[in-house]
Image: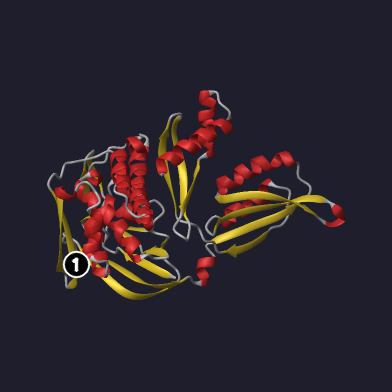
Amino acid sequence: MRALFYQPNCGLSGDMHLAAIVDLGVPAHHIEAELRRLPITSEYSIELQAAAKMGIHGTRARVDAQDQHDHRHHSTIVKMIREAKFASGIERRALDIFAGIAAAEGKIHNVPPEDVHFHEVGAIDSIVDIVAAAIGIEYLAPDIILCGPVEVGSGYVDCAHGRFPVPAPATQELLTGAPCTYGGVQGESTTPTGAAILSASVTEYAPKGTFAPERIGYGVGHKDFERPNVLRVAIGEYEMGAAHAAEHFQIEANIDDMNPEAYEPLFTALFDAGAVDVYVQPIVMKKSRPAHTLVALCSAQAKDAVADCILNHSSTIGLRMWPFDKRVLPRSSQSINTSLGAVQIKQVQQPNGETRWKIEHDDIAKLAQQHGLSYLRVQEILQREVAAQRT
């Protein structure tokens, strides 16, 4: 499958990402033409030039904004991107990146994502870097996006809310679940903008399959570290290895002698142990005994804990376990304001480029209780209002 492979062994920033994808082959005039859809064209300029860092040659990018302190709310940026009328893929990627930042900042500062006031990432240069990233990735059209370990740096960084150890709080939050290295260089090597691009884009970190690079690009940064301040990206063919299939496990047991009331606490215990899904299926066993097959899905890391949980909290005396592979559609979440209140929606992109979405069940139930309406009535209202906002 076609793969885009990030190799941020010296971290990445928004301008390094822009430079790297141009060096990889995305036409600069294409990015600039698409960016002109935004209502901020007169407020910035982009400079792209050949550059080198410690003997590594590539492209350097600089986005010069007239006002470096012009910050915006998340809702303002969402409106700006939607009104630009980008192709659906570009719009979705750009919105996903900003949604990730809003969720991270909202968690850090305990405010709803839609109320987040962006500081560094709300400035003109960061908006350009992020939207340019969405334009470039869509132009390359990879089937999968890979990424090696991310170097975050060391020391301290000055943020809008004070002085913090590297990485900045938003950077660390956005890289939750990603393999990171610390202290490889002195200073901040991965910025919140760079982390947000990875967080919303990467399908697989530390890939275990085989990658055959076809083209390579280098985005040269503006800082001087102990190692080259360069982001390397490559495009090529990727084949998942046998080890990839062993990342997920299915564990199941046939149970014919347990009180049905015991399943609910068993489910809770299994989720606490690390299961990502649990379900039961009715079956008929020997001597026509009615029974259930209990199935738990989990990661390889949680396999033993989930298996122990079944043996400790159910009446079975044995299990079946096997590895499996899975394919998951790219997904994101978004907060939408409605007449009944804010709701979270989950949206996925299908292989044909179309998207579909669903309102979170808990939000529908909560609003139904708050307004004294039936679940179905609230669902109907929310579906209509959310659909109207997304057209």
- Colour style of the rendered protein structure: secondary structure
Measured as percent of width and height from the top left, residue 227 is found at 21, 66
Q: Position of 340 compared to 149: left or right?
A: right
The amino acid beneath tag 1 is: Thr
Q: As drawn, which residue projects farthest toward the right?
A: 287
Residue 390 found in image quarter: top left
Evaluate whether residue 182 shows in this view: no
Task: Using the image as rendered, state which of residue 348 and residue 221 is in the foreground.
Answer: 348
Indicate the secondary structure of the residue bearing disc 1.
strand
Which residue is the site of mark 1? 59
Task: Using the image as rendered, state which of residue 280 and residue 32 is in the foreground.
Answer: 32
Q: Position of 272 compared to 113: left or right?
A: right
- Give the quadrant of the C terminus: top left
Against 17, is 316 above or below? above
Q: Position of 182 compared to 326: left or right?
A: left
Against 364, is 269 above or below? below
Evaluate whether residue 373 shows in this view: yes
Measured as percent of width and height from the top left, residue 21 is found at 27, 65
Measured as percent of width and height from the top left, residue 122 is found at 24, 44
Badge 1 crowding class, 10 Å Cα cut-off, few under 14, some 14 to 19, many 20 or more, is: many
